[in-house]
Image (cartoon, rainbow, N blue to C red):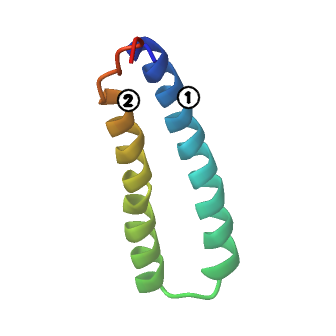
Amino acid sequence: MPIRLKKLIGAILLVALVVVYAVVATIVAVAQLAQSGPLAHFAFFLIGGLVWILPAMGIIKWMMLPSKPEGR
């Protein structure tokens, strides 16, 4: 697969990941943190703000892998 195509697919996946993750995190926060104190809010947003990095790193790593020769 050409590197330009991989980067295009990766960019689309990253944008989709951020949008879906933000929606899911917002739904969970609204549903679960309504009666929680400030410490629970802080912990949720600290952890939730960092967790999305793991799948994003996987996508970026895949984007940067060299392409295999097409003849093999």
Count of numbered circles on the image: 2
Q: Find disc 1 in the rendering and name its residue.
A: 12
Q: Residue 3 at what x, y percent from top left? A: 38, 16
Q: Residue 41 at what x, y percent from top left? A: 47, 77
- Residue drawn at (32%, 38%), measured in percent from left and top? 61
Residue 51, relative to residue 12: is it above or below?
below
* Kind of residue indicated by mark 1: Ile
Q: Residue 4 at what x, y percent from top left? A: 42, 12
Residue 42, relative to residue 61: is it above or below?
below
Secondary element at tag 2: helix
| Circle 1 or circle 2, nearest the eye | 2
* Kind of residue indicated by mark 2: Met
* Cβ atoms at labels 1 and 2 below 8 Å apart: no
Residue count near mark 2 (Cα–Cα under 10 Å), binned few <14, some 14–19, many ≥20: some
Quadrant holding the C terminus: top left
Q: Which of 22 and 38 is in front in this view?
A: 22
The disc at residue 63 is 2
The disc at residue 38 is none
- Residue drawn at (38%, 36%), measured in percent from left and top? 62
Question: Which of the marked residues, 1 or 2, is nearer the chain's N terminus?
Answer: 1
- Residue drawn at (49%, 16%), measured in percent from left and top? 5
Q: Distance between the residues labelled 1 and 2?
A: 11 Å
